[in-house]
Image (cartoon, rainbow, N blue to C red):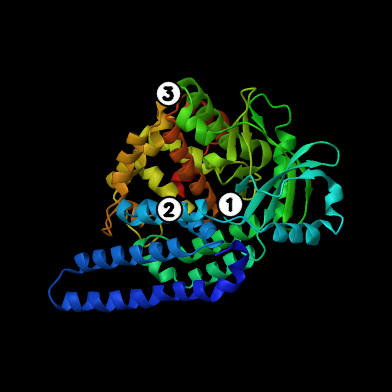
């Protein structure tokens, strides 16, 4: 299948998605029969949950084109599911993305003509018809702008936006299935928020606005470089070209010193951006970062940003610090006030403390080392599908959907890098509430 065939495959994708509620109904009926046959309700519920999860991720893994972006967005659900379910799904997504064929040259030229005009070639001294990179909804070409600057030209696949939003409309009807897996989660609200954010990612003019804001703020910054926007339209975004060593190569080939430096700058960028730009880069995978020859961290792709005009939520910093102080009563009250624990859900304080402790740990010590082994140990605590597993009782408020996505993905990158650094210093400097206890009483009363 070629990417340009996406719109014509809508019926096939809808058919795949339509199998999900039918499968769930069959499993629910089977579960009732087993309960009548003497199996305990908890055991039956666990079996239904596991099979539901397996089917959801199997179908998502088979969807191609724009639906890959959908699958990536839904990665927020993965933390509550066993690796044997999620692993094959992630492998399928990776395989699909790696194998995504480029647009035919004729289609590339057609998009450029539609977006930049019949004389689009006059904008460039040269244009490479072969893409240098491909993603789920677009591909990047290297070119030289008419003033001599090297540029990256990002072109969105025709029909990818319509296909992706169509998939999401189908998926939004399946909220009940996700509710089976994650009973504490307001699934409908989370899916609605994800759809809005994905719609934003399809808008290259909006992306250009965000990228330009980052480029202005970090112009001549000692730590970071963001290539500025040269030109933009709905389906084409032209930016300054940026050379550098991809973070993925730093992960595999970098020295310990280089990996420590990259990880510290990575965290500093994510934490300082809301305070400095009023936005959080919400797609922190290694492909979007480069280590430059001058020691700076270069940042690409601003399609997914979380607009935080007031900076990081103050409650985030407050609850992190209060957790470190051991006051679980105030932590739980604060989480309820923020919507992380719904009113009808009871939480075991000790189970919640055990679940949160490893993730707060980097902020509690002067220096911390992330590692794959550490991450695997934490993952073991969330692979229990029983309803009593605390992670499955927690909700994800819509205002935290992208923040959660950034933190989950960011921790994964840091563990790949094996970074040792003073992360607590970055939290103290950039996260409101972490070093200020003036509003703790109001938080506890919430």
**Is residue 312 toward the left or the right of residue 117 in the image?**
left
Q: Residue at x 34, y 74 (%)?
A: 24
Foreground tag (1 vs 2): 1
Q: Residues within 10 Å of mark 2 (few under 14, many from 20)?
A: some
**Is residue 154 toward the left or the right of residue 27 in the image?**
right
Q: Residue at x 50, y 42 (%)?
A: 316
Residue 15 visible in the current orientation: yes
Coordinates of residue 239 in the picture (x, y in percent): 74, 43
- Asked whether the beta carbons under mark 1 and mark 2 sit within 8 Å of each other, the answer is no
What whole-number distance in Å separates the C-alpha atoms at marks 1 and 2? 38 Å
Q: Residue at x 77, y 55 (%)?
A: 233
Quarter of the rendering containing residue 240? top right
* Element on which disc 3 rests: loop
Q: Which mark is residue 135?
A: 1
Coordinates of residue 217 in the picture (x, y in percent): 72, 35
Q: Residues within 10 Å of mark 3 (few under 14, many from 20)?
A: few
The residue labelled by disc 3 is 367
Is residue 297 depicted above or below 257 in this figure?
A: below
Q: Which mark is residue 336?
A: 2
Coordinates of residue 315 in the picture (x, y in percent): 51, 43
What whole-number distance in Å separates the C-alpha atoms at marks 2 and 3? 31 Å
* Element on which disc 2 rests: helix
Is residue 430 depicted above or below 385 in this figure?
A: above
């Amino acid at each position: 299948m070629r990417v340009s065939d996406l719109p014509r495959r809508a019926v096939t994708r809808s058919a795949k998605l339509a199998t999900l509620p039918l499968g769930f109904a069959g499993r629910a009926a089977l579960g009732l029969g087993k309960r009548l046959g003497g199996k305990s309700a908890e055991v039956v519920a666990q079996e239904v949950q596991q099979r539901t999860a397996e089917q959801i991720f199997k179908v998502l893994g088979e969807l191609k084109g724009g639906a890959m972006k959908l699958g990536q967005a839904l990665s927020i659900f993965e933390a509550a599911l066993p690796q044997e379910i999620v692993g094959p799904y992630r492998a399928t997504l990776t395989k699909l993305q790696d194998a995504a064929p480029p647009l035919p040259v004729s289609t590339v030229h057609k998009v450029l003509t539609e977006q930049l005009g019949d004389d689009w070639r006059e904008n460039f001294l040269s244009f490479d018809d072969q893409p240098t990179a491909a993603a789920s909804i677009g591909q990047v070409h290297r070119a030289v702008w008419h003033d001599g600057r090297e540029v990256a030209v990002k072109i969105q696949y025709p029909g990818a936006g319509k296909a992706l939003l169509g998939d999401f409309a189908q998926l939004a009807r399946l909220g009940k299935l996700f509710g089976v897996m994650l009973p504490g989660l307001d699934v409908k609200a989370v899916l609605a928020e994800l759809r809005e954010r994905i719609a934003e990612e399809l808008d290259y003019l909006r992306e250009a606005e965000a990228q330009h804001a980052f480029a202005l703020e970090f112009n001549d910054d000692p730590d970071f470089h963001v290539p500025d926007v040269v030109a933009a339209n709905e389906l084409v975004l032209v930016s300054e070209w940026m050379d550098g060593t991809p973070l993925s190569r730093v992960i595999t080939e970098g020295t310990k010193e280089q990996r420590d430096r990259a990880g510290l700058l990575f965290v500093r960028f994510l934490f300082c951006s809301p305070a400095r730009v009023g936005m959080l880069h919400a797609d922190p995978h290694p492909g979007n970062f480069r280590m430059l020859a001058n020691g700076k961290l270069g940042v690409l792709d601003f399609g997914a940003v979380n607009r935080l005009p007031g900076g990081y939520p103050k409650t985030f910093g407050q609850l992190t610090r209060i957790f470190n102080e051991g006051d679980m009563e105030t932590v739980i009250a604060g989480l309820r006030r923020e919507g992380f624990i719904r009113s009808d859900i009871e939480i075991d304080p000790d189970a919640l403390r055990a679940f949160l402790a490893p993730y707060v740990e980097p902020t509690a010590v002067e220096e911390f080392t992330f590692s794959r082994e550490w991450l695997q140990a934490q993952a073991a605590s969330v692979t229990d599908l029983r309803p009593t597993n605390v992670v499955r009782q927690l909700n994800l408020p819509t205002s935290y959907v992208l923040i959660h996505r950034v933190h989950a993905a960011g921790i994964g990158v840091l563990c790949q890098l094996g970074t040792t650094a003073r992360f607590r210093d970055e939290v103290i400097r950039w996260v409101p509430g972490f070093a200020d206890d003036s509003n703790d009483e109001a938080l506890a009363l919430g």
